[in-house]
Image (spheres, rainbow, N blue to C red):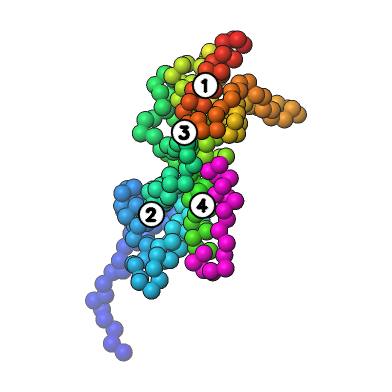
Amino acid sequence: MILLEDKRAPPPPYPASESSPIRQTGNGPKLSDLPPNILLHIVEATFPPYIPVDGLAGQRRTLYWLTVSLRLVNRSLYMASMHILRSTYFEAYTSLVKSPYTSDPFPTGSAGAGSDTDSHVLPPIQSIQREAEVFDLFIALKTREDVWLDDSELHLRNEDGLNDLFAVMQPRRRIEDLLRYYGLRYGFITLSDSPARRQRAIPFSYLTVSFSPRKVGVLLLTPAVSRTPQRRTVIAECIRDRDEILEISAKKLAKALGRYIHDTR
């Protein structure tokens, strides 16, 4: 055995600092730390290439995976996934809106009217438009139905689910958004829950709408207190024609709500 007298010193230990190549578990860079445009590009790269034999089944399976798995990981992946899902299914959603109903789940404006001076900040993943909830439910239903139909020709589409969305939920949420728009313009609806604003207007979070082809109404939600459950009280109603567009129904409902507020305050 030959012993080398000229031995090199062992390498120094890595310092426990941010520049150390060895990091503790959980402290390293995360996928969600990437800029949104790069993260969106990575999510788009998960789609398989088009295969003529398979058709678009692989694309639809990826869209289903975005819906039930990837978007639930964290906020950044939720926003990237929903950007792809909403842009993919927006045309299909609007094509199913029943005439004479209208749709606008993502308006270009912020709150719809600039009459509410109080700041109203929403999380980035939450939209002030209540119709956006219907759109997201449609995406969840559509992605599941498409994949199940690809897996089996015996699968029957859930026509009742689509009918519930577009015959009741979509026009009701659309009228709520329009009611918020007119209420902010006229000054009797506020986006703030502060006591000062509540003396002059009703917070929009306390209002909901009942809808039928012949009648619409505004319901005031009374929060649950102690053992008293939450209550819904009809405070304004108006009759609508079956072929009446939602904008006219919402304007009539807003005027009826204004009369209620004028009489009670």
The residue labelled by disc 1 is: 252
In what element is the residue under mark 1?
A: helix
Q: Residue at x 39, y 48 (%)?
A: 91
In what element is the residue under mark 2?
A: helix
Residue 130 falls inside the magenta stretch: no
Circle nearer the N terminus (3, 2): 2
The residue labelled by disc 4 is: 140
Q: Amino acid at mark 1?
A: Lys
Cα distance between the residues tagged 3 and 4:
20 Å
Of badges 2 and 4, the one in the foreground is 4
Cα distance between the residues tagged 1 and 3:
22 Å
Cα distance between the residues tagged 2 and 1:
49 Å
The residue labelled by disc 3 is: 128
Q: What are the residue bounds of the magenta stretch?
A: 149-167
> Magenta stretch mostly in which secondary structure?
helix
Looking at the image, can residue 177 be seen? no
Of badges 1 and 3, the one in the foreground is 1
**Label 4: few (<14), some or many (≥20) within 10 Å?**
some
Circle nearer the N terminus (1, 3): 3
Q: To which quarter of the image does residue 259 belong? A: top right
